[in-house]
Image: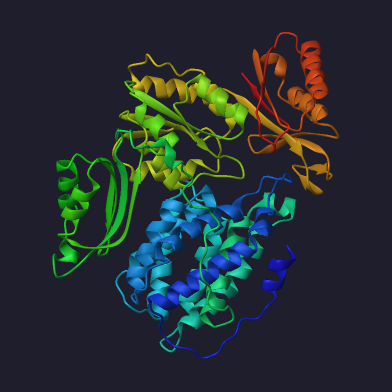
């Protein structure tokens, strides 16, 4: 964590500067914040309470910011209000992980206030940031202090309280950062688990890097930055899948940004119902359309993209247009061929070839790739919802850090009823899928059954510690194997199988009937034989089922039922 310590010990310049900023200056600041965060993403990932190689906070926050920056990359608007609205929409759809979702809500709240202005000074910025506090806290059902929420709230209130009529935007950020450093250091005092692990909150550390990067870009310490997404968006298609003899079966995926123009409509009073009526009249499917300030974004599946574009041009002019033949993509073709007569569909978040295949066999209609270290974004959830054809969609996040993004996606989706089951692990997701039956008519009763099944499993992951630490009164050395059960260390051993046995003892495994074990890629056949023999000898009444998970974070994932 030397990089952060150096930043914490670096003084912040108080050079005189302009008292206001516009859209272009704000864009440079956002680029700066994203650049500094990205440079330290791995460092933030390592700020993990548990000494295991599964930290992903830095990656999640960086990817979340990328979503926002991708929306403003081509936006040259001088207005800070317009630019912040573009950024807020992009960051919302790109949000992934708890830290990323909270970050998206912070900037969404800031944008709500900035949208009123072309330029802002310190007081307007303070008001916007205070609205970011309100928005981010309201997005979390049970806000936990000692996290990014605390760091952002305390630094914002301190800066807002200590500016005056002579203060510049630089003054606001200088004060904001000074308090953010103090607040981040105090997260250890607020959350005992951080003190015990001797780390500060990773989300708070990520936010501090964003604020520092924004300030350094504002004051010229960082050069102008050209944003380049780390995500490869180049379409990988085989154009030979659609030949001269092919017939268009699935239409075109059509997306565009339309700037409403005053020569054609009143952008401020424009009713999006007009857009939806036209798309419905032209038999558009899978429609997602919304308006931000004077820009309309539309996603639609259609056989006649030209007709839609022609009608849309009556309201303004296009900023971007993308049209893709859905027959060309094999995956899209397979999904489009599906004639789904089910009353509901189940989407499960999972990673590892073995687990994904198993979940599909158990009844998951779709797999959203992700989980620990690779949390899916809100946009990925929305796209997965869009590919379903049922009125009810059941979602299994299967990771505590994915639940918030799933809930946010469900809130903004209005074309189906989304039921998010708060499965915190792949083991809970496995148990939930075991009660899914295609013949169920009562969706509410099914959801209750799924929730009971998920809550009735005791799940644990076993992995190797990557640093020395003391947690829960237990001394853990680098290289030890630990079992993590419902967020707590339940066993420590010098071997994976030893940690497995100690976990079973800690849970009184003889009181259960079933044990399901997912083995990781690093587990050898001899280890599997050993653990099988151990269970058969020590717990002969347990019915054992073994699966290869195909993932490499955990040696074993265990479900007791």
Residue 161: x percent and y percent?
47, 76
Q: Quadrant of residue 246?
A: top left
Q: Residue furthest front?
A: 244
Tell me the quadrant of the picture where the C terminus can be found.
top right
Residue 137: x percent and y percent?
45, 55
Q: Nearer the viewer, residue 59 or 451?
A: 59
Residue 379 visible to an observer of this rendering: yes
Residue 169 located left or right of residue 476: left
Residue 488: x percent and y percent?
68, 38
Residue 81 located left or right of residue 460: left
Q: How many marks?
A: 0
The way the protein has been coloured in the rendering is rainbow
Q: Residue furthest top?
A: 541
**Above/below status of 223 relative to 509:** below
Q: Quadrant of residue 491?
A: top right
**Above/below status of 370 relative to 172:** above
**Above/below status of 145 relative to 300:** below
**Above/below status of 133 relative to 193:** below
For image coordinates 66% across by 34% down, the residue present is 551
Tell me the quadrant of the picture where the N terminus can be found.
bottom right
For image coordinates 43% across by 68% down, the residue present is 129
Residue 396 located left or right of residue 417: right
For image coordinates 46% across by 45% down, the residue present is 405
Residue 228 located left or right of residue 526: left
Q: Quadrant of residue 366?
A: top left
Residue 115: x percent and y percent?
32, 69
Residue 188 visible to an observer of this rendering: no
């Amino acid at each position: 964590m030397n990089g952060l310590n150096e930043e914490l010990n670096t003084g912040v310049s108080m050079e005189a500067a302009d008292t206001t900023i516009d859209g272009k200056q704000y864009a440079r600041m956002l680029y700066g914040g994203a650049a500094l965060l990205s440079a330290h993403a791995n460092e933030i990932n390592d700020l993990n309470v548990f000494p295991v190689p599964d930290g992903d906070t830095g990656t999640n926050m960086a990817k979340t910011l990328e979503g926002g920056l991708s929306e403003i990359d081509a936006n040259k608007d001088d207005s800070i209000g317009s630019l912040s609205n573009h950024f807020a929409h992009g960051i919302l759809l790109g949000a992934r992980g708890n830290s990323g979702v909270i970050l998206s809500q912070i900037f969404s709240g800031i944008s709500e206030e900035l949208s009123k202005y072309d330029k802002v000074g310190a007081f307007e910025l303070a008001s916007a940031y205070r609205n970011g506090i309100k928005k981010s806290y309201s997005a979390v059902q049970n806000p936990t202090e000692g996290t990014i929420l605390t760091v952002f709230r305390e630094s914002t209130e301190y800066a807002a309280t200590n500016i005056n009529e002579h203060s510049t935007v630089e003054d606001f950020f200088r004060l904001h950062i000074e308090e953010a450093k103090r607040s981040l250091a105090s997260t250890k005092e607020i959350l005992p688990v951080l003190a015990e692990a001797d780390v500060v909150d990773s989300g708070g550390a990520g936010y501090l890097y964003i604020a520092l990067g924004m300030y350094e870009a504002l004051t010229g310490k960082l050069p102008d930055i050209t944003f380049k997404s780390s995500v490869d968006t180049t379409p990988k298609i085989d154009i030979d899948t659609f030949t001269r003899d092919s017939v268009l079966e699935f239409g075109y995926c059509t997306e565009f940004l339309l700037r409403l123009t005053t020569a054609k409509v009143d952008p401020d009073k424009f009713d999006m119902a007009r857009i939806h009526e036209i798309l419905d009249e032209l038999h558009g499917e899978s429609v997602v359309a919304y308006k931000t300030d004077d820009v309309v974004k539309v996603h639609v599946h259609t056989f006649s993209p030209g007709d839609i574009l022609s009608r849309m041009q009556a309201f303004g002019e296009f900023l971007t247009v993308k049209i893709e033949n859905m027959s060309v993509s094999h995956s899209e073709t397979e999904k489009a061929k599906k004639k789904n007569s089910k009353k509901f569909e189940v989407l499960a978040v999972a990673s590892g070839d073995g687990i994904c295949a198993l979940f599909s066999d158990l009844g998951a209609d779709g797999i959203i790739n992700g989980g620990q270290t690779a949390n899916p974004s809100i946009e990925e959830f929305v796209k997965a919802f869009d590919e379903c054809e049922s009125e009810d969609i059941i979602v299994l996040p299967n990771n505590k850090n994915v639940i918030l993004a799933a809930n946010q996606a469900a809130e903004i989706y209005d074309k189906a009823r989304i039921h998010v089951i708060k499965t915190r692990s792949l083991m809970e997701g496995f148990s939930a899928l075991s009660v899914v039956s295609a013949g169920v008519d009562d969706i509410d009763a099914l959801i209750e059954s799924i929730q009971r099944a998920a809550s009735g499993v005791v799940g644990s992951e076993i992995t190797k510690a990557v640093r020395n630490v003391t947690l829960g009164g237990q001394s853990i050395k680098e290289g030890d194997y630990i079992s993590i059960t419902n967020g707590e260390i339940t066993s420590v051993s010098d071997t994976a199988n030893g940690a497995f046995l100690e976990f079973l003892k800690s849970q009184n495994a003889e009181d259960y009937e079933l044990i399901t074990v997912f083995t990781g890629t690093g587990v050898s056949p001899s280890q599997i034989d050993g653990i099988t023999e151990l269970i058969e000898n020590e717990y002969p009444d347990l019915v054992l089922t073994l699966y290869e998970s195909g993932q490499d974070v955990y040696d074993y994932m265990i479900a007791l039922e």
